[in-house]
Amino acid sequence: MLDAWLEEYATTAAGGECAAYVADQEPIDGLDSGLVIFPLANATTSVYLQPIAAGAPDWRVTFEAQPEVTELSPESVHDLCRELANAADLCAFLQRKSLAHMAERAVVDGG
């Protein structure tokens, strides 16, 4: 499902520059944790998006600790800002899709 959502997001204006992908993971209690990797071209830190808990509709962007200092030109800082704005847009998109999916399941499940 996440792959389909990423494909849908890629058709949007912001998603056209998005290189995010779903990480291969072992399911937790039978559920995929929903880890989406968001590579940054202008920083060395790893960034990923995931629900706050398996099956939860609320998503967060996580920045891992960076092992070294990053020095950027003004242009590269602007590029990094665009990348981070895209990460935020994708995170909000995934949250909207999760909320809609949960609402659809509630209707199907009868309540």
Image (cartoon, grey):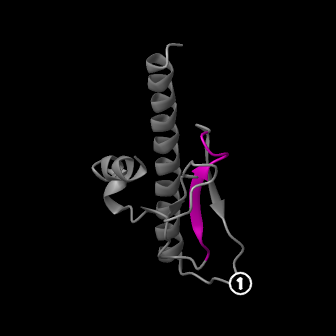
Q: Check residue 87 for magenta coloring.
A: no
Q: Which residue is mark 1?
A: 67
Q: Is residue 51 above or below residue 64?
A: above
The count of marks equals: 1
Q: Residue at x 62, y 84 (%)?
A: 71
Percent across and percent down for residue 43 are 56, 76
Looking at the picture, which amino acid does disc 1 mark? Answer: Pro
Q: Is residue 23 above or below residue 51?
A: below
Q: Viewer-proximal residue, 2 or 46?
A: 2
Percent across and percent down for residue 78 are 49, 68
Q: Residue at x 52, y 31 (%)?
A: 99
Q: Check residue 51 for magenta coloring.
A: yes
Mark 1: secondary structure: loop
Q: Viewer-proximal residue, 57 or 106?
A: 106
From the image, which quarter does the C terminus lie in? top right
Percent across and percent down for residue 54 are 63, 45
Residue positioned most to the top: 111
Residue positioned most to the front: 30
Query: 86 left or right of 49?
Result: left
Percent across and percent down for residue 8 are 31, 46
Q: Residue at x 49, y 13 (%)?
A: 110
Q: Viewer-proximal residue, 92 or 36?
A: 36
Q: Range of the magenta residues?
A: 45-55
Q: Is residue 46 above or below residue 106?
A: below
Mark 1 crowd level (few <14, some 14–19, many ≥20, 10 Å Cα): few
Residue positioned most to the left: 11
Q: Residue at x 40, y 46 (%)?
A: 1
Query: 65 left or right of 5?
Result: right
